Amino acid sequence: MSAKWMLDLVFRCEKLGIVVATFSNITLLYLLAFKASSSYGAYRHLMFAYTIVEIIYSLLSFLSGMVAHSTENTFVIFSLYRGYVERSIAPLFLVDFCGSYFTLLLLLVVHFIYRFFVVCDFKKLVYFNGYYLAFWIVGAVFCGFANGILKFFTFPENERLTNDLREDFMIYYNLTMDQVVYNGPNYYICDQNNKCQTPIADWITMIYLSIGLVFSVLIMCYCGYRCTLKLNKKDPNASIRTADLQKQLMIALVIQSVIPIVLMYIPIFLLFITPMFRLGFDHWQMRLATAVISPPKDQFTRTIHSVIPIVIMYIHINLLFITPMFRLRFGPYVNIAMATVAIYPPVDQFAIIYVIKDFRTTIRDFLNCKKKSVSPTSSVVFVSRWSNKSVY
């Protein structure tokens, strides 16, 4: 049964993603540069870095044209081979996108650590000043792209895997293996008698990447939970405006984490683990794309809403990683994960613009064609909530 429409779906999502993400990210960069004063502290610089990486992420997603396929023994990410570069280095463009993906997740974790220090351990904010801040950002970029390069060298194309994929690619996509380049682990190497071996290097690498994704979510959940408890307690030394700004930034960060969980984490997690269990989901996994998240109406739902990136970025990706270990098969429908990954950046940035009051007001006034009057108290130095001085 042909599933070429799945590839068309991903390609259209990538085109839509690059257009909308360019607009949303440029808008957010403008707001960060001109509407977010120094009172936002290191958060402003972290958001600058995060937004720039998202632009690169969307660009690489569009240029690579990356799609995926999952069987009971493996999952691969692949793209159409145009012959522009040598075939041996063509998969490097695929892992470049993987590097930007890992970098986004690491920067998101850094955001949560920073917010945890601001709210719960103010003295440690010194580790986000000056060169320390640059270290956090550069370290996230280095580690993210190092993981991508690790995939490039650990999972090269090989004749055995190419032969295993040949029939699937012809049936589902009407493609020969000469028309594609791919990269991915081979969890099981089976002979004609169905006796299988498990390549140790492939397993160790994918377990490491999967644990990294899970651990990053645990850090975000812990920091978010502690911050929520702290913010719910009234601080007699904090002004109303300062407390309000802190809650805005925290809600924005929560949303910024929940969106990746839904759009990026869940689908890739499925892609990772289904082959481990050698299970097949060729037909019913389409239902996984039906989840709908309601806007928050109270503190509890705000907390849930903060998990959006985890659902959009994390769970999909980790399942993508480890399902082949258990021999779960998604076939061509794993491209639902790739489609959600492609549309993550614009969804994420629009949510941030909406939650932060200064940004939302600027956009509203612009749409109403009114000149915004700048109030000296429109923003406050949120670190002042921890001092005995009033901001008024």
Image (spheres, rainbow, N blue to C red):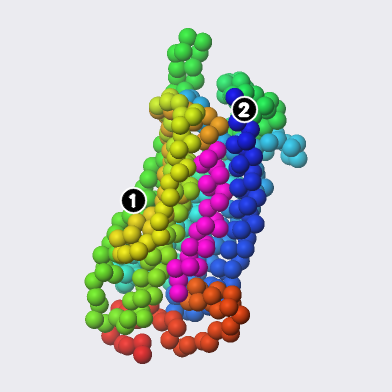
Magenta stretch: helix, strand or loop mostly: helix
| Residue 201 versus residue 100 in the image, above or below | above
Q: Earlier in the sequence, mark 1 or mark 2?
A: 2
Left or right placement of residue 299 versus residue 316 in this view: left
What is the C-alpha distance between the residues marked 1 and 2?
A: 39 Å
Left or right placement of residue 122 versus residue 367 in this view: left
Q: Which contiguous range is marked in magenta?
A: 335-357
Q: Residue 156 or 58: which is nearer the viewer?
A: 58
Mark identifier at residue 344:
none
What's the residue at 48%, 63% (across, down)? 351
Q: Which residue is mark 1?
A: 218
Element marked by disc 1: helix
Q: Residue 149 or 243: which is nearer the viewer?
A: 243
| Residue 17 versus residue 274 in the image, above or below | below
Indicate the quadrant where residue 371 lies: bottom right
Residue 187 in sight here: no
Q: Which quarter of the rendering shows the C terminus?
A: bottom left
Find the residue positioned furthest to the right: 84
Q: Which residue is mark 2?
A: 2
What's the residue at 33%, 76% (across, down)? 243
